[in-house]
Amino acid sequence: MSSTLSSQECRDGLPRHVAVIMDGNNRWARARGFSGVRGHRAGVESVRAVIRRAAERRIETLTLFAFSSENWRRPADEVSALMELFLWALKREVKKLHEHDIRLSVIGDRNGFSAAIQQHIERAEALTRDNRGLHLVIAANYGGQWDLARAARRLAERVEAGELRAAQVDEAALGSQVCLAESPPVDLCIRTSGEQRISNFLLWQLAYAEFYFTPLLWPDFDGAAFDQALDAYRGRLRRFGMTDEQVEAQHA
């Protein structure tokens, strides 16, 4: 689906695809004298609240940036706790998602995870595969540069095999190989904690997304805050390279 068509469908309504960079767990914990791990645990409730509200608002796809490929650089005890929390969520939360007709997908390099985590990811995706409600995507051990490099490698392999000519490698070809290729384009990207960067998140998929930055730390971000982001999105005029007059004429 083209970005222009996405604009036509969403300009006066809600975004089809919302992506969230969940930031601020550590700062939330430090401000309260807690460990960083406590902040990540507190952030789980915000995850639940946003998933619930996205489903209620009939958002088609919600992508959450849970663990970046750079997060392995964090202290070993924090990484270990995050992996335990991820495994716990896969064991305990997936059944609830399934009961609410939510489909779960995980994007990122799974080879970095333990065998147990990889096994539970596969089970979760298999259990929810046929659900028709919200499509929840968790980006874990994900990096936008990794995503693009993998897509380029796949196309290069096809060229080497004689299945594709170099002249056929264009935006559409590359776009078909990145993560979320089958999902609607990202319409809205939310980042919490006041930071204003994308941190190697969905570099290709965010090409025409609207950005919403909030000073709220992730554990303080709830359904009402999600609604505020949606309201801000609804007030945007999405041009996709066109003038205001062209956009207005398109919707006349």
Image (spheres, helix red, strand yellow):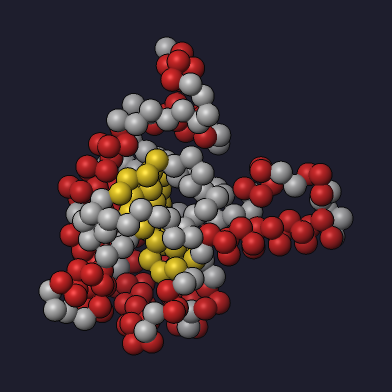
Q: In which quarter of the view is residue 21 placed? A: bottom left
Q: In which quarter of the view is residue 89 placed? A: bottom left
Residue 146 placed where, x, y %?
A: 58, 64
Q: Residue at x 31, y 41 (%)?
A: 58
State whether residue 16 appears in this view.
yes
Residue reaching furthest to the left = 32
In depth, the one of 44 and 216 nearer the eye is 216
Q: Is residue 243 rendered to the left or right of residue 190?
A: right
Residue reaching furthest to the bottom = 77
Residue 150 placed where, x, y %?
A: 64, 63
In the image, residue 183 sits, relative to residue 81, either above or below, namely above
Residue 25 placed where, x, y %?
A: 26, 69
In depth, the one of 241 and 153 nearer the eye is 241
Residue 76 placed where, x, y %?
A: 38, 87
In depth, the one of 175 and 74 nearer the eye is 74
Residue reaching furthest to the right = 162
The quarter of the picture where the C terminus appears is top left
Q: Residue at x 75, y 47 (%)?
A: 169
State whether residue 97 appears in this view.
no
Q: Residue at x 48, y 79 (%)?
A: 113
Number of dots carrying numbers: 0
In the image, residue 96 sits, relative to residue 185, either above or below, namely below
Q: Residue at x 66, y 49 (%)?
A: 174
In the image, residue 190 sits, relative to residue 139, either above or below, namely above
The quarter of the picture where the N terminus appears is top right
Q: In which quarter of the view is residue 30 placed? A: bottom left
